């Protein structure tokens, strides 16, 4: 809950309630409500009895989850290893990062002050294990537990700070074990037999005797470079120049290990906590800073929602989240290699503007079914396969056997009667227009795969036809002609006809 609730309501105590087991329970509360002795999980009826002038708000878990994720995005400025501790907490693995901010105490103070300035109530603690840090944070704010002092730090705390189920906490209290030190004094097998192995593992992690890694909400990028600013920046020139410098630094870091970037992410951290991330994918591993700079310029120019700096960015980060080893090729004599590089660069620039899924290539498939003869695939990921793909050769001087573009779904046409039982129609109606057939080529009989027929005879007879207006169609009759099929009045039933494509 935002801290400024107290100011907006002139100190009126406020709580957020949620329905659980057909009862309204306190989900969260502000400092004013806490001073009245109200607690999370308390029934609303009891809270109103204690504080009649209580202001009650309904919980919105979806909005809370979004806010928590937004705060997690903002916390990426301190460490890329951020995990959710729902519904109200976050884990930050600051191993190897604290010295960048002047030490653990400085990073803790900086983080809390920044979030408090944004209007959030914050409590934080630092320890060698996530469970120990969370346990300390439940009881006191701002504690830093040195490595090896976990047991001494958590022993005086009440058992509820471990975050176990209320049934376990109540059972411990009934057994006379009111503090974590009381629980730790008992044999581990006794605790496990009574409360389960999961609780014992949690206890050992709080005491520093065991550890479990956090699960970051985002995978750790392969390479990260960033630029922090003493004063926020907001001009396009400074932002573009910063991206250019970061691109050169990133490429230099990857070059040491012979790698190139396939996915790049640029993150812009605003002073008010808003984070904007732009992602660029490439078809080939990028090994030049100028290419990265040009791709992000294309991406920035194509944004429907421009990059709003607000009061300015205090951090810009460029990361390579997917890389691969660059294979050196001889490029001096092979002109095709240069052609492929130019084509890949063009595809990357177009994809940066309109999205990678919208730039596709068609790959030939080993099938005679027309609608399955080509597979549409993203060009950035299948460019190499497209350049070596072998399509059926067209006979020199002969018209194409099939249209270049087929309808996504064959469209039905009305055919009164065919010239002969297995022959083409002499006229047909398509899209409410009557077409008289003047020239015909075919038929080309295509049978569907037998394993897809489900006991039905799936056979198509295709015809290339031209009408009196000069339009050329590719039509087919669905199924074999059977003269025995008749309607209730004894008239022959016409076959089903479709138009599958148009010739240029």
Image: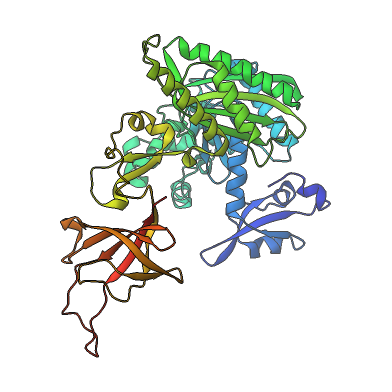
Answer left or right for 16 relative to 463: right
Q: Nearer the viewer, residue 288 or 147?
A: 288
How does the figure colour the protein chain or chains?
rainbow
Q: Residue at x 65, y 65 (%)?
A: 45
- The vertical placement of 492 against 64, above or below, is below
In percent of width and height, residue 494 lies at 27, 76
Q: Quadrant of residue 441?
A: bottom left
Residue placed furthest toward the right? 10
- The vertical placement of 147 against 447, above or below, is above
In percent of width and height, residue 26 lies at 62, 56
Q: Quadrant of residue 110?
A: top right
Residue placed furthest toward the bottom? 489
- The vertical placement of 110 against 364, above or below, is above
Q: Is residue 219 visible?
A: yes
Q: Residue at x 37, y 33 (%)?
A: 382
Q: Quadrant of residue 326?
A: top left
In percent of width and height, residue 16 lies at 66, 56
Q: Is residue 128 visible?
A: no
Count up the numbered dots.
0
Q: Nearer the viewer, residue 230 or 257?
A: 257
In percent of width and height, residue 399 lies at 32, 46
């Amino acid at each position: 809950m935002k801290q400024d609730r107290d100011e907006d309501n002139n100190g009126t105590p406020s709580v957020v309630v949620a329905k659980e087991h057909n009862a309204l329970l306190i989900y969260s509360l502000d400092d004013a409500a806490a001073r009245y002795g109200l607690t999370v999980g308390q029934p609303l009826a009891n809270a109103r009895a204690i504080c009649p002038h209580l202001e009650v708000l309904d919980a919105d878990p979806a909005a809370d989850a979004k806010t928590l994720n937004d705060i997690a995005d903002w916390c990426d400025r301190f460490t890329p290893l951020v995990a959710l501790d729902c519904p109200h907490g976050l884990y930050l693995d600051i191993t190897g990062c604290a010295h960048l901010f002047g030490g653990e105490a400085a990073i803790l103070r900086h983080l809390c002050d920044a979030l408090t300035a944004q209007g959030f109530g914050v409590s934080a603690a630092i320890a060698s294990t996530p469970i120990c840090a969370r346990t300390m944070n439940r009881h006191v704010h701002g504690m830093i537990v040195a490595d090896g002092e976990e047991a001494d730090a958590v022993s005086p705390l009440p058992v509820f700070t471990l975050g176990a189920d209320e049934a376990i906490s109540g059972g411990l209290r009934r057994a006379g074990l009111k503090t974590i030190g009381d629980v730790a004094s008992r044999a581990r097998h006794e605790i496990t037999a009574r409360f389960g192995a999961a609780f014992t593992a949690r206890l050992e992690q709080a005491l520093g005797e065991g550890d479990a890694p956090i699960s970051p909400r985002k995978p750790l990028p392969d390479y990260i470079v960033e630029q922090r600013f003493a004063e926020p920046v907001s001009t396009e020139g400074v932002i573009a120049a910063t991206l250019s410098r970061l691109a050169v630094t990133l490429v230099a870091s990857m070059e040491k290990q012979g790698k190139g970037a396939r996915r790049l992410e640029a993150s812009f951290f605003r002073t008010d906590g808003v984070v904007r991330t732009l992602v660029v994918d490439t078809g080939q591993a990028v090994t030049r800073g100028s290419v990265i700079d040009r791709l992000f310029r294309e991406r920035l120019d194509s944004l429907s929602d421009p990059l709003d700096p607000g009061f300015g960015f205090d951090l810009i980060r460029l990361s390579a989240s997917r890389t691969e080893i660059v294979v050196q090729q001889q490029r001096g004599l092979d002109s095709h290699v240069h052609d492929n590089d130019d084509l890949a660069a063009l595809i990357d620039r177009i994809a940066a503007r309109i999205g990678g899924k919208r730039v596709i290539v068609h790959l030939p498939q080993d099938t005679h079914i027309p609608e399955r003869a080509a597979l549409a695939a993203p060009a950035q990921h299948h460019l190499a396969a497209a350049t070596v793909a072998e399509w059926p050769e067209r006979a020199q001087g002969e018209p194409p056997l099939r249209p270049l573009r087929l309808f996504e779904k064959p469209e039905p046409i009305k055919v009164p009667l065919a010239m002969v039982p297995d022959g083409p129609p002499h006229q047909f109606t398509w899209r409410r227009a009557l077409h008289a057939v003047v020239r015909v080529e075919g038929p080309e009989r295509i049978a569907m795969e037998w394993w897809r027929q489900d006991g039905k005879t799936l056979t198509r007879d295709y015809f290339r036809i031209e009408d009196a207006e000069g339009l050329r169609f590719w039509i087919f009759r669905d199924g074999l002609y059977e003269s025995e099929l008749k309607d209730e009045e004894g008239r022959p039933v016409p076959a089903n006809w479709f138009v599958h494509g148009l010739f240029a």
